[in-house]
Image (tube, grey):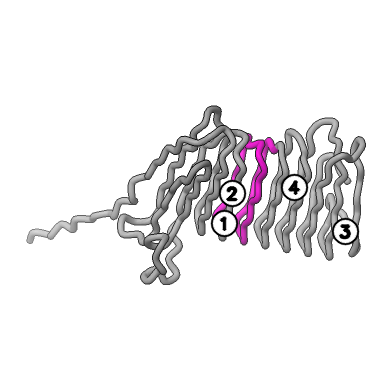
Amino acid sequence: MLVPLSLLIFAAAPAPKTWTFKTSTSPKVSVSNISGSISVESTSGDQVLVEAKVLGSESSPWTVEAESSGDEVKVRACCGACNQHPSNCGSSRDPVEIIVKAPEKSALRLKSVAASINVRGIKGSESLKSVSGPIEVAGTGNELELHSVSGDIKLTAASIEDTKIHTVSGDVQIKLPKSPDVKVRLKTVSGRLNKAEHPLGTTERVFGKGSKEIDIHTVSGSVDTDPTI
């Protein structure tokens, strides 16, 4: 007896999409994503390069749109067209990878729900916000705002400008540059500071003249610093 053979067909993931935008050497770059990742790294020149990939099946309702206006670049991951109200997504959250290469003096505005955020080598101002995705920043050189609800935050700074870090339950790791000139101020409810229990209130330490400030606010998130405070 002949046994019928079953042909297995695997749905392919959508092909990556790429964009190249001509800008100045200090553009404004905004990126929003729900699930997956946002990665930004510095590059020389006056262009912003974007690559996006939906990690679901070919029938995934998720799309990525990128556009520029003057010196501003916006990238968004959306369920369906970004200018329409989603109608067929339900609980679908196919991961989307967004990779951006931007001039080092770019100003960043990144928003995430569960997507991770990773920024390297950018020296412009940065505002990074996440609900549950982790945030990691290396090589900062200008004003920095990091906000998270439950995602962990890791900052490795080559230089420091005024910095604000706020998290509810996410943990915070900070590695200061050599010979830092900064005042570090921590306010927490029940978080641990450098492995030790920390009572309700504010702790601060000045390195050098304390010309710049790092303000850290947590509810229950722990904080580890190097050097310690």
Relative placement, left or right, of 110 versus 217 is left
Magenta region includes residue 123: yes
Query: Gap between marks 1 and 2, in whole Å?
Result: 8 Å
Labelled pair 3, 4 in contact (Cβ < 8 Å): no
**Quadrant position of residue 207:** top right
* Residue designated by label 2: 117
Q: Which residue of the protein is positioned furthest toward the left in this rendering?
A: 1
**Amino acid identity at mark 4:** Gln
Circle 3 sits on which residue?
Answer: 197
Q: Amino acid at mark 1?
A: Ser
Q: Which residue is mark 4?
A: 173
Q: Earlier in the sequence, mark 2 or mark 3?
A: 2
Q: Amino acid at mark 3?
A: Glu
Query: Dividing the image into 4 quarters, which one contains the N terminus?
Result: bottom left
> Between disc 1 and disc 2, whose residue precedes?
1
In the image, what residue occupies the spot 57% across and 56% down? Answer: 112
Relative to 150, does residue 53 appear above or below in the rendering? above
* Mark 2 to mark 3 CA distance (whole Å): 29 Å
- N-term-proximal mark, 2 vs 4: 2
Q: Which residues are magenta?
A: 114-140
Q: CA distance from mark 2 to mark 4?
A: 15 Å
Asked whether disc 1 touches disc 2, contact meaning CB atoms under 8 Å apart, the reply is yes
Judge depth for marks 1 and 4 and give the one in front.
1
> In the rendering, at what x and y percent does residue 93 appear?
45, 62
Mark toward the viewer: 2 or 4: 2
Horizontal placement of 216 versus 24: left or right?
A: right
